[in-house]
């Protein structure tokens, strides 16, 4: 099949959405399909990566702001292409929003792969974004009816109730995953240097201040490393000031803040971590926890998205509970090994891209046929 995927985020951008869409596109190409991606302009060195053709468009703006740039060029590209299947990744992004009014003109089979209706479930403090979100989700159903199929990440997302409310029945679930080659092989957990790890962009929504204080409340002296690829609202500087405050309140601990690392460098830190901490306020299906599971790193996470459905770690509600679990996991070898095996076992059985893309193909081929 000739498949066109539209996405705001794509390789080499470092984000959960980018890694998901890149994995899906490249697996489809590996299976012999003709795959193209229309995405943002990052001045990539090559227009082809791992068999996927990449078309860049200079469009700026985010949800709550005005889109600007090569808007008409992008729309013309989508409407003039001759392809069998169109896959739109995410809503509330220019790559989908700019073509919603034109879906009826597209003859290809149309698929929406949603990564979460975030402003339907999270009430933003930005008044303009709040008003826009209310209107957006009031008119979205008429566009969703134009799609041949809708994919959501899991059955606990807000999209399920939303679709049932608006009598939209052509949907199913396509989870996130990792490549089989990513899965650890007999990881040795007793390393000379132990450290606790968090990987999240330095955004207030990622809430690293929660895990930072939880770490200080734990009795362990094992160091904490935080890695982020982007910073919003000077949040990294805020976290560094919080560290100074916690040093004064709880006593000094070694905390390292890293940013701007490559994907390869970040994965090296992940592979050698002892425990993975996650404290986001809003997620649907956090990729980074799946990656920790695949690398046999037990996780401790806030109750966000579908994390409580995952094996290989524990979900907590409070900083005190996270602190207690950090100390517990570092001391209880049998529990630690139980989590490592449960996590990687779940990846092998349910959350690898080869199985997930086949599920996608089953729907595409049924629609195409």
Image: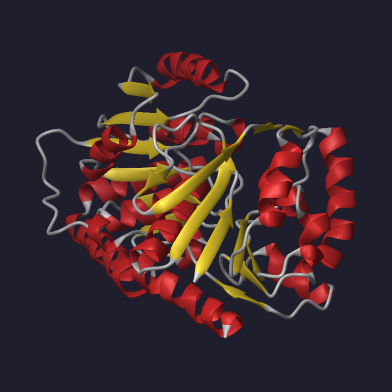
- Report x, y in % for residue 159: 70, 65
Residue at x 80% of width, y 72% of height: 145
- Report x, y in % for residue 153: 56, 65
Corner quadrant of residue 80? bottom right
**Residue 316 falls left or right of residue 262:** right
- Report x, y in % for residue 68: 76, 31
Corner quadrant of residue 344? bottom left
Compared to residue 32, the image places residue 227 above or below, namely above
Residue at x 56% of width, y 33% of height: 41
> Which residue is nearer to you in this view: 193 or 90?
90
Q: Quadrant of the C terminus?
A: bottom right
Tally of marks: 0
Is residue 325 visible in this depiction of the protein? yes
> Which residue is nearer to you in this view: 71 or 24?
71
**Residue 114 falls left or right of residue 314:** right
**Residue 220 falls left or right of residue 98:** left
């Amino acid at each position: 099949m000739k498949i066109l995927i539209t996405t705001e985020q794509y390789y080499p951008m470092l984000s959960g959405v980018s890694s998901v869409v890149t994995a899906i596109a490249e697996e489809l190409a590996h299976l012999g399909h003709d795959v193209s991606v229309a995405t943002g302009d990052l001045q990539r060195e090559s227009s082809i990566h791992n068999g996927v053709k990449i078309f860049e468009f200079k469009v700026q703006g985010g949800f709550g702001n005005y889109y600007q740039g090569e808007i008409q060029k992008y729309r013309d590209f989508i409407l003039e292409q001759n392809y069998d299947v169109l896959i739109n990744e995410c809503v509330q992004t220019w790559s989908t929003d700019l073509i919603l009014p034109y879906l009826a003109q597209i003859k290809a089979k149309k698929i929406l792969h949603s990564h979460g209706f975030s402003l339907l479930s999270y009430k933003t403090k930005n008044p303009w974004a709040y008003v826009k979100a209310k209107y957006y989700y009031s008119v979205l159903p008429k566009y969703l009816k134009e799609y041949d199929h809708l994919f959501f990440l899991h059955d606990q997302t807000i999209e399920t109730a939303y679709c049932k409310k608006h009598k939209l029945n052509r949907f199913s679930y396509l989870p996130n995953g990792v490549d089989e080659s990513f899965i650890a092989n007999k990881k040795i957990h007793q390393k000379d240097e132990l450290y606790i790890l968090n990987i999240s962009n330095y955004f207030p929504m990622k809430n690293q201040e929660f895990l930072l204080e939880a770490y200080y409340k734990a009795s362990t002296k094992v160091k904490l490393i935080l890695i982020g690829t982007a910073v919003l609202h000077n949040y990294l500087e805020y976290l560094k000031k919080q560290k100074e405050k916690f040093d004064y309140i709880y006593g000094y601990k070694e905390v390292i803040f890293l940013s701007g690392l490559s994907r390869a460098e970040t994965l090296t830190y992940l592979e050698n971590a002892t425990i993975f901490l996650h404290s986001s306020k809003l997620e649907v299906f956090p990729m980074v926890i799946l990656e920790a599971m695949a690398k046999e790193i037990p996780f401790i996470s806030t109750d966000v998205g579908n994390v409580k459905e995952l094996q290989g770690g524990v979900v907590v509600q409070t900083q005190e509970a996270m602190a207690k679990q950090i100390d517990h996991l570092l001391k209880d070898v049998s529990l630690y090994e139980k989590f490592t095996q449960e996590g990687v076992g779940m990846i092998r059985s349910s959350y690898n891209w080869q199985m997930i893309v086949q599920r996608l193909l089953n729907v595409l081929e049924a629609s195409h046929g």
